[in-house]
Amino acid sequence: MMTEAQLNLAYLAAAALFILGLKGLTHPRSAVRGNTIGALGMLIAVAVTLVDQGVMRIELIALGLGVGAAIGAVLALRIRMTAMPQLVGLFNGFGGAASVLVAGAVFFTAMQVAARAAGAGGGVIAVTPQESIATAASGLIGAVTFFGSLVAFGKLQGLVSEKPLRYPGEQAVKVVVLGASLAAAVMIVQTPADTGLYWVLAAAAGVLGVLLVMPIGGADMPIVIALLNSYSGLAAAATGFVLSNTVLIVAGSLVGASGIILTQIMCKAMNRSLANVLFGGVGAVVESAEQDDLYAGKVKQTSGEEVAMLLKTARRVVFVPGYGMAVARAQTAVRMLTEALEHDGVDVQFGIHPVAGRMPGHMNVLLAEERISYDKLREMDQINPAFPQTDVVIVLGANDVVNPRARENSGNPIAGMPILNVDQARTVVVIKRSLSPGFAGISNPLFAADNTLMFFGDGKQAMEGLVAAYREA
Amino acid sequence: MGNTVGLITVFVLAVFVGFEVITKVPPILHTPLMSGSNAISGITVIGALLALSAGESTFTTVLGFTALIFATINVVGGFLVTHRMLKKFRKEQ
């Protein structure tokens, strides 16, 4: 056993290490150390809790820790980098589930203790308002996080259609389920003795989580993943209030803040409000009529040989990768072409839009895995001024984030969205299967621009063909 | 009630600290930030340990045990996968 002061000081140390660990993530140089510092904080928190609790149920605890650690380690070490969005989605969900279960277990135990005391003639107040409110919040947020994350995982893994599921009366259905969840939460606070209500709450909130994520389409996934990340933190913080435990509250609120910031960044990069992403209808409609007029007779098709010749005379080349690169697994070929170009003295950089891919930072991880130096990975604001001095831009599997129609004031789903100004480069090569629209469902005048060449084909095969052609040229 | 206000104070201040620190994380590290913060939200593991130790009935023990597994997956998986990713970010050899 430890004194309460010792225990809380140890928790304070753990919380401080979490903050220092996150601070380490502000630069790639210090990031590995930061992550280790965070892990050390967690180790301290777990260790002092175990010491404080003595050896109560140690075999069950050891079993739970062992099984969880084994599953976590296998997932973490086996996962392909292209599948990182679904793994993070799944982990968000596990965090939510843990909060629901912990809050439930603590709540039921308190009720059982109170019932026994009442049986013995003692009139004991089972839970304080803080505990009952926090329990309801944990159940609500945690269940939305868990079930919402399962749907997000299913969509990213391809188990559920990535297309937005929209239906008549959709918003009304969500409002009704949200109302039911909130009603259950209020009833728990009013009559905590009715423990069955907790499962009613968790079930209603679970349905709400599913309903919230089903209508979200593929390209909006970065926002949803970031939002669920925030929720998993808030659920942990709520559980901290259930237990009056400061380290849970601090860690949970740090994660909650982190997820909210990422959500804001993603929304800004799409020029959309969070409400529009959650309840708006982007991605459900596809225009087609005006496409023929726009593209007819203006699209210039190219080949690997022609692009290779262009690259031979280029001094500055910028790659603009999108989700299509991840799907085609073309990043290895991108690295090979980068190496070949740099060998010939060409300056190669990467222009990365904040929402490229299926989660924040997705493209950077894929390129880092190919050992492409991180100082070549440029943010939108850094790379945009450089496009007019760029000889060749290779757009690989990206569409909406390079669509000049975003500069229009209104009238289309991406109006006002900040984009990568690739059309200002001398030549733009777009590697793409067809002229089909991107997630926003609108045509892209870039494909018909005078300085654009369309290289039709699978991203990986096209890039490999290009590498071969460049080496021969 | 005094204790509740104290906890709310901790919560609000931690949110501010979180905002300050995390706004400085560059976009290239946003994926590791998410997986790393995922691992930190696995702090619920503490709650699971407490719930499991205090469990009165089989039912609450099952809840606590399941929570412990979920939270430990989060902690171990989150820190490990973040480490794996961050090792890949390197500057020109």
Image: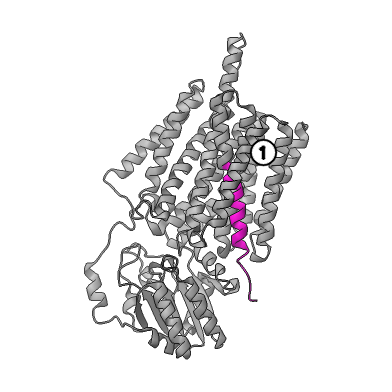
The image quarter in which residue A327 lies: bottom left
Q: Residues within 10 Å of mark 1 (few under 14, many from 20)?
A: many
- Secondary element at tag 1: helix
Amino acid type of disc 1?
Thr
Tell me, what colour scheme is on the image?
one colour
- Rendered location of residue A345, percent (x, y): 56, 87
Q: Is residue A125 above or below residue B41?
A: above
Q: Nearer the viewer, residue A91 or A350?
A: A91
Q: Nearer the viewer, residue A387 or A155?
A: A155
B91 inside magenta stretch: yes
Q: Main secondary structure of the magenta part?
A: helix
Position of the C terminus of chain A by quadrant = bottom left
Q: Is residue A431 above or below residue B36?
A: below
- Rendered location of residue A154, percent (x, y): 41, 50
- Rendered location of residue A452, percent (x, y): 36, 81
Which range is magenta?
B71-93
Q: Is residue A86 above or below residue A43?
A: below
Residue at 56 percent across and 45 percent down: it is A233
